Image (cartoon, rainbow, N blue to C red):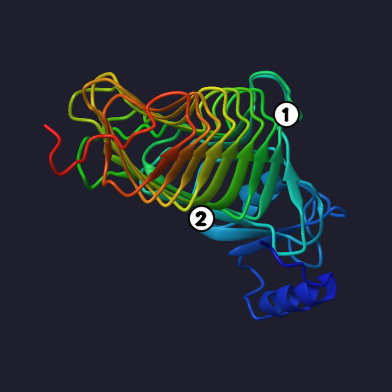
Amino acid sequence: MRTAIPLTVLATGLACSLFTAPAQARARVFVASYGNDSNPCTFGSPCKTFQQAVNVVDVGGEVTAIDSAGFGPINITKSVTITSPPGVEAGIAAPAAGKSAITINTTSSNQIITLIGLTLDGANVSNTVGISFIGLSGILNVRDSVIRNFGSDGINFEANASSSSNSDPSQFYVSNTLISDNGNIGIVIEPAGLGPTTGVLDHVQMENNAGEGLRVRADVQATQTVKVTVSDSVSANNAVDGVFALSVGGKATVMVRNSILAYNQFGLETNGAGATIRVTRSTITGNQEAWFGTVLSYGDNNIDDNGNANTEPPNPLTYK
């Protein structure tokens, strides 16, 4: 939970950090409800939108919201951190049907995009997405955020790494984040490129989405690998699966630990020879079916009150 702090404290801290930096530096820039995009985006003269701030900040720099307002949408093409501090609600909405609130379209590999404390709301506009990662390989960090009411997906991660080398990986991390009430899937991990993809979801709530809570898909070629770990998270009341792993060509592997899969159509489901879900120390309850497909268990889950398959899946240590 985010704890509010007085804006006077925030202002003092940000001002001090500003005055210790060189005048020409753009390593840290600011937006505010009273800002103007013709301003230099300093703390004393903030910009109005996240987009203008992202345009002027140094590669690898930070954009910070001073007060609560709507600052989006954003198209990101470089490494950057965008932060809404505790006590500030920085809102971002998709600009129109078929668009994304945040589009990440990096043109070079190994870019790092970090999004902290943001509130993304799609207002149920058709075919919109909260965060769309369509660039080359890179790292996406999403923390302490809310992503809701988009016409399509909450997060769509489709990194397009051009090389199958392990030196060109795609990575994503989502933590302490609510992804709910979206018109399709909560989180889609469906890389379009050749490189390996790994990800971690920790303390993530995926709720009331019209498709799956989480979909992990590998389908570019046989050598493609997509590996995701889900821990201490909830995927509940989704219209299809809590967690779905799909393999058309490559390998899609999900580890679910200490999590809740409840009131979905399937708690856990796989499709395709290269798709596997392993589950441990989790509660699977109230689903139409607890699990289906290649779902392997360590034998220490609570599985009860589902419409079907109220038993542990096969043990991965003995499964053939």
44 lies left or right of 179: right
* x then y, percent, for residue 57: 61, 56
Earlier-in-chain disc, 1 versus 2: 2
From the image, which quarter does the C terminus lie in?
A: top left
Find residue 31 and report its image quarter.
bottom right
Q: Amino acid at mark 1?
A: Pro
Residue 128 seen in the figure: yes
Q: Is residue 32 or residue 132 the one in the foreground?
A: 132
182 lies left or right of 33: left
* x then y, percent, for residue 262: 53, 36
Instruction: Read off the residue under disc 2.
Output: 59
In this view, the mark in front (1 or 2): 1
Q: Residue at x 72, y 77 (%)?
A: 13
Q: Residue at x 52, y 41 (%)?
A: 77
Number of marks present in the image shown: 2
- For the residues marked 1 and 2, what is the alpha-carbon distance in whole angstroms? 25 Å
Above or below residue 126? Residue 25 is below
Q: Is residue 31 or residue 150 the one in the foreground?
A: 150
Above or below residue 25? Residue 167 is above
From the image, which quarter does the N terminus lie in?
A: bottom right
Q: Amino acid at mark 2?
A: Val
* x then y, percent, for residue 125: 73, 22
Instruction: Read off the residue under disc 1.
Output: 95
Categorize mark 2 by other alpha carbons within 10 Å: few (<14), some (14-19), many (20+).
Answer: some
